Each structure stands twice: as C-alpha cells, then as structure tokens.
Image (cartoon, rainbow, N blue to C red):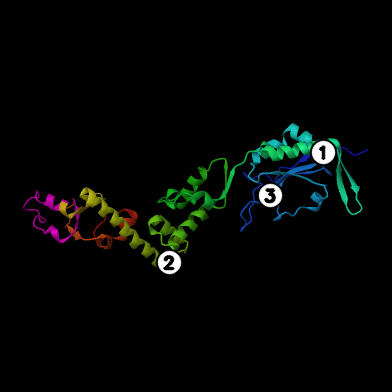
C-alpha cells in the first residue's frame, strides 16, 4: 500500500512584494515563474526559473515534478492566500495521491492516475485562464519608477537628500514593488544631468551633494553656478519686459528702461538719481534701501554682477 503523503507548503521565500519577479541584466523580460508541486514528498511552493531559455529540470522532464506557470508579477499576499485555499490544496492533494513511478528502460518516470490527471488538468486550466486569480503588482527599478515620466526636481529639489528619500518611499503605492536604492537613483540622475550639462534641471542642493561625494569637480560646480545665474537672470529679464520690472529679492527689482524712465519723472529733485541718464542701459537694479542704481544690459551682465550665492541660495545681499 502506498504511504499517505500530505501537502507541505513553503512560503519562506515570499518576502518581497513580487517575490517571483527576477530579471537578469541584459534581458528584456523577467524570468518565468511557477508553482511547483513535488508529488514524491508533497512539497508545494512558488518560485522562479533561474534558467534562461527553455531549459527545464530533469525531474520535470520525466514528470517527477509538476509546474504550473504563474505571472512573475504575482503578489506575495495573493500567493500565500492561494496556498491557504482549501479547493486548491485539495486538487494538489489529488495529484499527489495519484502519483506513482515506473522504470521505462532508461529513466524513472512519473505516472498519474485518472483522478490525478483530472486534478492536474484543472490546475493547469486555472493557471492558463486567470493566473489562479492571483493579483499582480507593478515591478520596476528605482530609476525607472522615478524618472520614466518625471524630472529630478519633482522628487528632490532644495530639500536635504535624506528628506527626499523618506518622502518618496512613503509615497510608493502598495501595488508597486520598487527595486533598488532610491538614494542611489537620485544621485545617479543628478550625476547624469551634470554629465550632459543639463544645468537647468539641477539646483544648488544637487551640486553640493555631488561635490561632497567627490562625484564632480569644483570646476564643474563653477560652470553650473555661472549657467544657473545666467538662466535666472534671463527669467527676470523676460518678466521685466512684460511687467516693467521683476523682483529679484525683497526690496530689489530689475527695472526695464522705459518703466524706470517713466517713474523717474516723479522723483524728487533732491534724489541723487533724478538726473541719471537712464537711456544708457536697458535694465537697472533698483532698491528701496537707497542703494545707487546700477545699469546693466543683458543676462550675462546681471549674472556677473550678482554673487552666485544669491542665485543659488536666494540671499538678499545683492551688491558686490
């Protein structure tokens, strides 16, 4: 008489959100995943196929193992629920109960009774029909999750890096399995932006962090500072052209020539700036602390005049 074998479920490997998802570097797709039933000892588990291509174990080839394909993105929670489902376990038990072995002249091969074959076919049907009803979640690496459709500053702008990481991690939805290190992904994105000189997408916080990690040189940081200053100045010029002036910091504006000339007419005669020829420059720095007017003509002039720390950190110490 055949010894009674009972199903023994293993779930120790189901610790990640999508524990069956594994994709080798250089491969377009994830490795295949399956539920494995060993009718010899009743063991039941879910796992992924480490072999690339169509290679399978000899035990499977000779029907001494049973595999049912599942989606690699199946969630751990739904897999555990499946392994607790009485109907599913009963079908697996029927396969085990109807299992036997025989020698075919070359190998020991597995054989199944009619009842076991029917149970196998039903399990296979459920696998093919709806993935055993398993829920699937989205899986991607940290870089893809962050930057597939977004810029670096949408996640990490001027706040400390650690604060940005905490904010990102706390915002990941339960149906996402984000692989890799969030902090490393942010740093690598900043480094790539520097490499391709996409200065406008970087902030002083990014540059400082890269400098502290020795990922960029002081010369590169200076290149960013100059470009950033010019970009900021260009923004102020565009506003001044439309509105007449642009507030650079509290109490300091960049005034367009025609705007300040019109305003000059109402200045008191004793004002030392009353008689300045304002047609000499296209733009004028104008402060409410009685600082002398400063004439400038383009973004480069403005950037050169200001201390770079003004543009990077927003200080109000605006005159050299």
Q: Which mark identifies residue 319?
A: none
On the rendered structure, is 294 left or right of 142? left
On the rendered structure, is 145 left or right of 255? right
Give whichever of 198, 71 is nearer the camera.
Answer: 71
195 to 92, vertically: above or below: below
- Residue 34 in the magenta stretch? The answer is no
Q: Where is residue 58 in the image (x, y as percent from the top left)?
A: 81, 53
Q: On the image, numbered disc 1 is attached to which residue?
A: 117
Q: On the image, numbered disc 2 is attached to which residue?
A: 217
Q: What is the spatial separation of the Cα atoms under label 1 and label 2, in whole angstroms?
A: 68 Å
Q: Position of residue 215 (x, y in %)?
A: 47, 63
- Residue 271 in the magenta stretch? The answer is yes
- Specify the quadrant that holds the C terminus: bottom left
Q: Residues within 10 Å of mark 3 (few under 14, many from 20)?
A: many
Q: Do the residues labelled 3 and 2 touch (CB within 8 Å)?
A: no
- Specify the quadrant that holds the N terminus: top right
On the rendered structure, is 18 left or right of 102? left
Q: On the image, numbered disc 3 is attached to which residue?
A: 32
Q: Where is residue 45 in the image (x, y as percent from the top left)?
A: 74, 43
């Amino acid at each position: 008489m055949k010894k009674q074998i009972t199903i023994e479920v293993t779930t120790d490997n189901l610790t990640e959100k999508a524990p069956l998802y594994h994709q080798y570097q250089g491969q377009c797709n994830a490795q295949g995943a399956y539920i494995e039933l060993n009718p010899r000892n009743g063991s039941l588990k879910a796992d992924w196929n480490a072999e690339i291509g169509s290679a399978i174990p000899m035990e499977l080839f000779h029907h001494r193992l049973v595999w049912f394909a599942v989606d690699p993105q199946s969630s751990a929670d739904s897999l555990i629920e499946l392994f607790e489902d009485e109907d599913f376990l009963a079908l697996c038990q029927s396969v085990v109960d109807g299992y036997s072995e025989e020698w075919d002249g070359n190998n020991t091969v597995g054989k199944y009774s009619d009842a076991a074959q029917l149970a196998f076919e039903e399990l296979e049907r459920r696998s093919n029909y709806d993935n055993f009803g398993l829920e699937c979640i989205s899986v991607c690496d940290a870089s893809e999750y962050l930057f597939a459709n977004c810029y670096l500053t949408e996640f990490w702008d001027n706040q400390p890096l650690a604060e940005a990481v905490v904010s990102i991690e706390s915002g990941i939805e339960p149906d996402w399995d984000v692989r890799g290190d969030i902090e490393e992904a942010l740093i690598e994105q900043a480094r790539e932006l520097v490499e391709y000189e996409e200065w406008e997408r970087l902030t002083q916080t990014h540059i400082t962090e890269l400098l502290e990690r020795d990922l960029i040189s002081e010369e590169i940081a200076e290149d960013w500072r100059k470009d950033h200053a010019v970009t900021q100045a260009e923004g102020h010029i565009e506003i001044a052209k439309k509105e007449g002036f642009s507030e650079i910091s509290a109490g300091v504006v960049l005034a367009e020539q025609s705007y300040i000339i019109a305003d000059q007419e109402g200045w008191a005669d004793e004002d030392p700036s009353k008689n300045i020829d304002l047609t000499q420059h296209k733009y004028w720095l104008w402060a409410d602390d009685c600082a002398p007017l400063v004439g400038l003509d383009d973004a480069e002039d403005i950037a050169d005049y200001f201390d770079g720390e003004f543009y990077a950190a927003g200080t109000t110490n605006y005159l050299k």
